[in-house]
Image: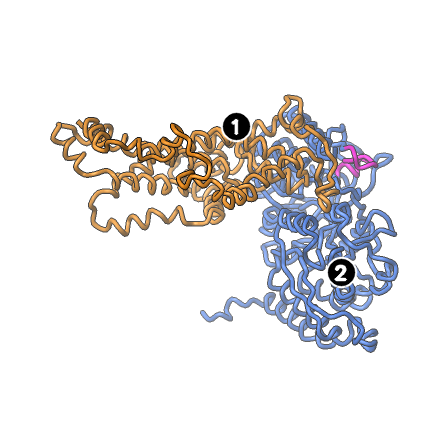
Amino acid sequence: MSDTAGLTRRTFLKAAGAGAAVASFPTILLSCGNENTSTSTAQKQTGTLSLFISKDTAHPQQQIQLMDLVKQAFEKQNPGSTFTFDTYASAAEEQTKLETAVAAREGPDIFEFGSTVVPTGYASGAFEVITNTMWDELGGKKAFFQPQLAMSGPSPDKLIGVPWSGNPYAMVINKEMLQAAGISKPPKTWNEFVDAAKAMTNGRDTWGTAMAPADGFDPWHKIWLFVTQMGAKLMDDTGKKGLLDSDASVEACAFWLDWMANFKIASRQNATFKGADETKSFASGKIGMQVMTGPGGIITYDQGAVAGKYEYVVGPTVPYGMSSLPAKGKPAQGFVSGQYMTIFKYSKNKELALRLMKVMTSPEIQYQLFKLRAQQPVVLETFTKYPDAKVAPWDTLYDAELKSYPTPFFGSWLQLEVVLGKAINSIAQQIGVTGTYSKDALKAALSQANQQLAASIG
Amino acid sequence: MITEERESAAVAEPGIEQVVPGASARAHPLPRGSPLRAPYWMMTPSLALLALIVFLPILIAFYLSLTGLNQYTIGDWLHAPFVGLRHYRDTLLPQGAFASSLFNSVKASVAFSLLTTVLITPIGVGAALLFNQSLRGRAFFRAMMLIPYIIPTFVNAILWRLVFMNGTGLVDQLLGDFHLGSRETFWLIGPNALWAMVLADVWAAWPFVYLMSLAALQTIPGELYDAATIDGANGVRSFRHVTLPLMRSTLGLALVLSTINHFNNFTLPYVMFGISPPEQVNVLPLNIFVNSFVTFNFGLGAAMSVVALVIMLTPAVVYLRAARVGDETR
């Protein structure tokens, strides 16, 4: 058969949609941030900026396409200037580059960080505080999704990160599986969640849910969620003391691990799963509910067996074993998550870097970020200018973003993520191999993790 | 007979003691300014380079191990707070927060390096013996033997990760197809992880022993085998009494180098298992990397590196002794 035989209606429409978005870009070039193009360019700094940004492993081609559009707009508005970019595909790469640049005082002009790495960047003291004048250049702080600013810096006058994209969390359900199991509406409590998941599990090829304990981030995401809903914390308010071995933490970890070990609503094979495996698993149509997931999976779902059968919904907020939210509990769906642009303190192109940020945070580029990479825009004007950025499933994600809670802004949070992840991972591996675990072993692992955290913080 | 031949060869060079400059210098020190006096000052550039490349980094690592260098101080690392021996207490004392982690890592590293070395030795020596003989297509096969060795470690690690993937990997598929085990056997987590890593490394590393052994075999004169045959030695006896003794020093060196290399292998476990590896394969280099570059605890990472250096001095001393044995033989 010819090549065109493999072109489905869906693929065609997608390609046409992306094409149309790109085709409309000449207008974008003229409109994004053009109010200042008449100002004298003779006094403006020119040069070549270097960027270090996270790689979009799910949509690599679309990322290149987007950066091309950014470059066109930037070069048009800033004659004689351009930028190059390098990408990192893992947290380890991101951190190594950060460490090297800070120690050598030499590196890219702009670093892109995930929300929980911004505190580490701030702790290093190697990134420019964005002053009010600079914010004004970018359209003012009010132009941005307000929860995002909570992770830009430790206080409103010490913000170092300019929000670039959002990653709101919600629960995604397979409507067909829920319906087949006789469940009419998504669970609101974790007890309901377990019951619904059991109803969808046959223990062979369909499972109520999935988990990714081998992932570098997923374990602390989930434990943070459960602990926050319980009204507890993983770290005290000073950022000097971990609370990983508290009763709430142990209960939260046990509840999550029990999905595999006791409730048996997730396959034991999940013990080796990373985030991408979990998403693929849901896309295959064999998983009923995927908890605390962002928009990153939308393209994968649309290309999988679950296409047209899934929906983003508000996930459970009432802790397991409780009938309502406890006194200090928060109805959290997720933490403030997304990507931020920061200006390296030792850059010689700070003014130019700010001008590039202005281009990247224009509603037009933000909309392209949404269309091409399925990322949530963080500039509010984008949603008024392009209403489809808030159409389902994005409406749920938009609401989820408004209800997200910031993680503590401490440089030591990153260490907490790692030690907690390792402790959970070791028990999950035990479950994968033996099918069970002891709560004492979990307590010991968390206690050791807490000791290691204390020793690391010093 | 062989021993007699070697002894007679040594005796055939009388007066060798007198022409060794070091020996005469020791007996009668030459006067200052003598042209025959060893011009040690000429070694200054080499010594300076050695100090810069080897000793200075070690000193810096030791200094860092006494500081609380972390994400807050990395921008000005020379002024990181001095914490004395705190990191050593954390790692070496039984109640230290990282003591069990370090101990497990040392265990994992020792087990991994010794098992790998033990397994690659017979494979490498056997292949060298086979391809030291006249065979049709010998050059081609000799080249083929090197393929696992020249494949980059990270590629090797990715390949073996895929082979050992739970459920979908080749190993689990074969186990299931031939009813030898469960198709759902875990190889990348749990106790099997060590064997998975050892197998992956054996596949990549045995050509090193093969190369060294082949080089040693090619230096053994054929006459010695002829003499052994005349004396009535069969193949096994020739191997035990001719081949093995004459390749002993080279093979010993190969095994020591191999052990050190496996002990320091970082890429293979990092790519195969990531930064949260099972305890069984959380080898020392990986543990140091995680502490230094993932949790930003550079001081602790430096202290662990110093401990690793001390541990590695053991086979290093063996290596140096082996190298000296080589000098004496020459």
- Front-most of A273 and B109? B109
Tell me the shade of chain A. Answer: blue
Task: Look at 24% across and 49% down and name the residue there.
Answer: B138
How many residues crowd mark 2 within 10 Å: few (<14), some (14–19), many (20+)?
Answer: many
Provide the residue designation for mark 2.
A377
Task: Look at 71% across and 42% down and name the residue there.
Answer: B78
The percent position of residue A274, horizontal first and vertical second, equals 60, 44
Q: Are marks 1 and 2 in contact (CB under 8 Å)?
A: no
The percent position of residue B178, horizontal first and vertical second, equals 37, 38
The quarter of the picture where the C terminus of chain B appears is top left
Q: Main secondary structure of the magenta part?
A: loop
Task: Look at 67% across and 64% down and name the residue there.
Answer: A372
The quarter of the picture where the N terminus of chain B appears is top left
Provide the residue designation for mark 1.
B107
| In the image, residue B222 lies in the stretch drawn in magenta | no
Q: Residue furthest top?
A: B94
Disc 2 is placed on an element classified as loop
| In the image, residue A233 lies in the stretch drawn in magenta | yes
In the image, residue A179 above or below residue A195: below
Residue range corresponding to the magenta coloring: A226-241
Residue type for callout 2: Pro
Residue B99 appears anywhere in the view: yes
Q: Tell me where residue A447 sits by quadrant.
A: top right
The percent position of residue A1, horizontal first and vertical second, equals 45, 69
Task: Look at 27% across and 30% down and name the residue there.
Answer: B245
Tell me how far mark 1 sits from mark 2, CA to CA.
Answer: 49 Å
Tell me the colour scheme of the image. Answer: by chain
